[in-house]
Amino acid sequence: MTQLIETKLPRTFPLRVELVRQLKRRRTLVAFILVIALPLIVVAAVKFGPSANNNGGGGFGDGDLDLVGLATAGGWNFALTMVFFASGFLLLILIAMFCGDTVASEASWSTLRYLLMAPIPRRRLLSVKLVIGLLLSIASIVVLIGFSYLVGLIAFGSGNMVTPTAGEFSYSEGVYRLAIIGGYIFISLLFAAGIAFLMSVLTDIPLGAVGSAVVIVIVSNILGAIEALGSLREWLPTYYSNAWIGALSSDIEWGDMIRGTSYSLITFTLLIGFAYYRFDRKDITS
């Protein structure tokens, strides 16, 4: 009988149930509205802004050989530029929110102890929360790229992706390069996801968990910009966050992306492991 109960316990909290719960939350709706609004706002500014008749103004779509200057070359270039704009802050906020507003939100609602009394094994609860948080994070990147491409396609045409250093890519090659970029950005943000998830276990305040992750990543980025630190900067988990630029070369430069991936996965694993360790021993009072 004990074995039968143990085999059935993990099924008491299926991924589908948690996914539906999270999709119905207002913050999830707001998050995806922001992702969709970004390319619309940029296109509106380019098409109807004060500098609309001056090649986009401010360097946007002016033809210079950089990501912003080539933004209006077609749908793929516009999507690439939106990823460039969003990766520094918007996607950081979203992944910190999806992974930080998980356990802490249940604690703030005083529903966490009732979930564990269902009974749901603690590790099962954490695993489901983490998986759904990461799935929503991936979805936000996919939606950003896909919707930005559609908006760019309507506004600027269906030209192939043009890069500052490697010239023009074919359609299939552009899709491949943008998929690599999106995947790497997600991996580079796992450091923030790990911090947010750990803080979600340690605190009952969702905003504190999200804010801690954002602040730590920002501080790490600031330290990475201080040249006086020399080679010490290379050990920062965020140092290689922009290594995806190597995917725009004629021959993809994998070196920095491999290093960045390794650092992100190692720190993410350590942070998540400590989160499980703390949650196994935490006294749930809310």
Image (cartoon, helix red, strand yellow):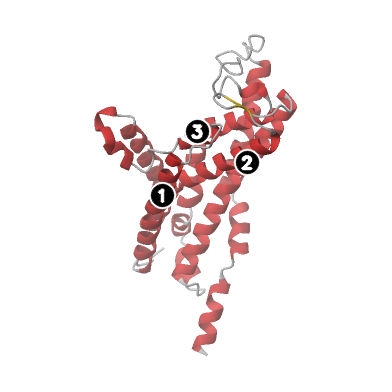
Give the residue pinned by disc 2. Answer: 176
Label 1 residue SS: helix
State whether residue 114 appears in this view: no
Q: Residues within 10 Å of mark 1 (few under 14, many from 20)?
A: some
Question: Residue 117, position in %: x, y?
Answer: 48, 73
Vertical arrangement, residue 216 with respect to residue 7, above or below: above
Which residue type carries mark 2? Answer: Tyr
Depth order, front residue of 152/42: 152
Percent of width and height locating residue 87: 50, 36
Sequence order check, earlier mark of 2 and 1: 2
Please give the residue where the numbered disc 1 appears in the rendered image.
Answer: 262
Q: Residues within 10 Å of mark 2 (few under 14, many from 20)?
A: few
- Residue 182 appears left or right of 173: left
Please give the name of the residue rendered at 68% of the width and 16% of the height, measured from the top-left corner.
Answer: 48
Task: Identify the residue shown where x is 61% and y is 63%.
Answer: 17
What residue occupies the far top of the structure in this picture?
Answer: 54
Q: Is residue 76 above or below residue 9?
A: above
- Disc 3 is placed on an element classified as helix
Q: Does any portion of residue 81 appear in the rendered image?
A: yes
Element on which disc 2 rests: helix
Q: Residue at x 53, y 83 (%)?
A: 5
Along the polypeptide, which appears first: circle 2 or circle 3?
2
Measure how far apart labels 2 and 3 are at the Cα level.
14 Å
Residue 118 tag number? none
Image x and y of residue 184, in percent: 51, 43
Residue wearing tag 3: 245
Q: Earlier in the sequence, mark 3 or mark 1?
A: 3
Question: Would you call the spot at circle 3 few (<14 residues within 10 Å), some (14-19), or many (20 or more)?
Answer: some
Q: Amino acid at mark 3?
A: Ile
